[in-house]
């Protein structure tokens, strides 16, 4: 069952959802770790390299997830949900997608501020589309930091809402994404 139906999300949507969730957790950890490294730390270049490479991979998966969400059937929101919960769910999902696009854009602008491309696992490079610019790295870096942590709080709220539906409301919402 590759595609979704009225009871649950399909295999493709679930695989993308959980892969992105895991990668976002790794990105949050490596991003935070990278900001704590000193210039003389032996991992000073390694952790950011992996963070950027995984960031590009995650961005590709996010774009695929958005495209898939537009063409796939998804189960409707549970009828027992109150109107404000449905509005909050839709607003939260849209906000998550927007943040999942803005965070990598700001990371890309920060990483390419010196005019160099982003190397992705040594497989290929994402070129710097803008000329080198002083000041862009700091501005984009601040945006990246605050958007990422804002996104992390939104993800936490998303998890708490799913757990509320599973264990308090017992309405089967979480089961739709677990399978």
Image (cartoon, rainbow, N blue to C red):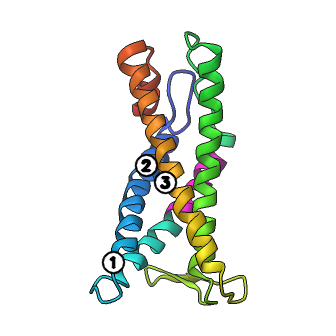
Q: Give the main secondary structure, helix, strand or loop, of the magenta stretch.
A: helix
Q: Is residue 170 visible?
A: no
Residue segment shown in magenta: 58-68
Circle on res. 21: 2
State which quarter of the image contains the C terminus.
top left
**Crowding at label 1, few (<14), some or many (≥20) Cα neighbours within 10 Å?**
some
Image position, residue 79 (x, y; %): 59, 11
Which residue bears the numbered disc 1? 37
**Crowding at label 3, few (<14), some or many (≥20) Cα neighbours within 10 Å?**
some
Q: Please identify the residue farthest to the left as the structure is shown.
A: 42
**Crowding at label 2, few (<14), some or many (≥20) Cα neighbours within 10 Å?**
some
**Residue 65: in magenta span:** yes
Q: Name the residue at 60% across, 36% down.
A: 92
User: Which marked residue is nearer to the observer: mark 2 or mark 3?
Assistant: 3
Disc on the earlier residue, 2 or 3:
2
Image position, residue 36 (x, y; %): 35, 72
Disc on the earlier residue, 2 or 1:
2
Q: Name the residue at 35% across, 18% down.
A: 167
User: Quick check: marks 2 and 1 in contact, CB under 8 Å?
Assistant: no
User: Which marked residue is nearer to the observer: mark 2 or mark 1?
Assistant: 1
Image position, residue 118 (x, y; %): 55, 82
Q: Considering only vertical position in the picture, is 176 above or below 133?
A: above
Q: Name the residue at 57% across, 22% down.
A: 6
Circle on res. 149: 3
User: Quick check: marks 3 and 1 in contact, CB under 8 Å?
Assistant: no
């Amino acid at each position: 069952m590759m595609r979704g139906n009225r009871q649950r999300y399909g295999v493709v949507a679930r695989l993308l959802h959980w892969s992105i969730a895991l990668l976002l957790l790794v990105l949050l950890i490596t991003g935070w770790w990278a900001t704590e490294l000193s210039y003389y730390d032996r991992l000073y270049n390694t952790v950011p390299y992996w963070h950027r490479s995984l960031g590009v991979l995650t961005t590709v998966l996010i774009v695929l997830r958005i495209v898939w969400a537009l063409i796939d059937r998804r189960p409707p929101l549970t009828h027992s949900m109150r109107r404000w919960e449905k509005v909050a769910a839709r607003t939260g999902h849209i906000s998550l997608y927007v943040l999942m696009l803005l965070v990598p854009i700001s990371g890309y602008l920060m990483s390419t501020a010196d005019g160099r491309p982003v190397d992705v696992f040594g497989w290929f490079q994402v070129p710097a589309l803008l000329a080198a610019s002083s000041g862009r790295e700091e501005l984009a870096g601040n945006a990246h930091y605050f958007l990422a942590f804002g996104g992390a709080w939104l993800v936490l709220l998303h998890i708490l809402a799913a757990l509320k539906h599973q264990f308090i409301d017992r309405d089967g919402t979480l089961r739709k994404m677990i399978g």
